[in-house]
Image (cartoon, rainbow, N blue to C red):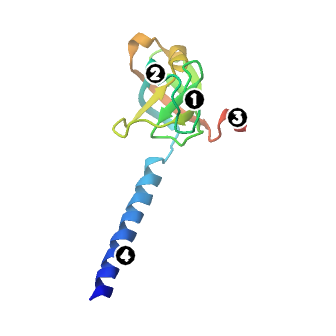
Amino acid sequence: MTIVIKLAKMKRIIFTLLVFSLSYTVSFAQTGNGDKIKASYYHDKFTGRKTATGDTYRHNLLTAASNMYKLGTRLLVTNMKTGKSVVVTVNDRMAAHMKNRVDLSQSAFKQIGSLGAGLLNVVVEIVSGKALSEI
């Protein structure tokens, strides 16, 4: 009887790990072929805090947070309305409920739009899978 219970537990563990690994892989399936998403910007309160990569967030650097792209990925973010673009490096993650969005540093956001806009419709393309410091 205990062998049956152990096998059942083992099956649940394997199933859970399989589901987790598949969902993790799918959540970072980077297309980079002109994803049309929304762009927002970091609030001032995040200045000086650690990012997911261990860097300290500074609003004057060209960085971004995203759940769609892998850490270290360089992105070309283009404002669909004005055509203005900026290249940023993904160095942080966003809250899980923030889907189809990229959160830009304030300086990156200012290069493609006004902070007063709050949200912008953008096209995102992958420039490189490596951070600027690795190139």
Label 1's element?
loop
Q: Nearer the viewer, mark 4 or mark 2?
A: 4
| Mark with earlier residue (4, 3) | 4
One can see residue 42 in this view: no
One can see residue 36 in this view: yes
Of the pair 33 and 3, the residue shown nearer to us: 3
The percent coordinates of residue 12 (x first, y second) are: 33, 71
The type of residue carrying mark 1 is Thr
Distance from the alpha carbon under mark 2 to that under mark 1: 30 Å
Q: Residue under circle 1?
A: 56
Of the pair 107 and 112, the residue shown nearer to us: 107
| Mark with earlier residue (1, 3) | 1
| Mark with earlier residue (2, 1) | 1
Q: Residue 80, which numbered label?
A: 2
Q: Residue under circle 3?
A: 133
Label 3's element?
helix
Residue in view at x 41 percent, y 64 percent: 17
**Image height of 74 relative to 45, above or below:** below
Residue that lies at the very extreme toward the bottom in this rendered image: 1
Residue in view at x 26 percent, y 89 percent: 1
Q: Residue under circle 4?
A: 10
Disc 4 residue crowd, few under 14, some 14–19, many 20+, Cα 10 Å: few
Distance from the alpha carbon under mark 4 to that under mark 2: 50 Å
| Mark with earlier residue (2, 3) | 2
The type of residue carrying mark 3 is Ser
Residue 116 occupies which quadrant of the picture?
A: top left
118 sits to left or right of 85: left
**Image height of 1 relative to 97, above or below:** below
The type of residue carrying mark 2 is Met
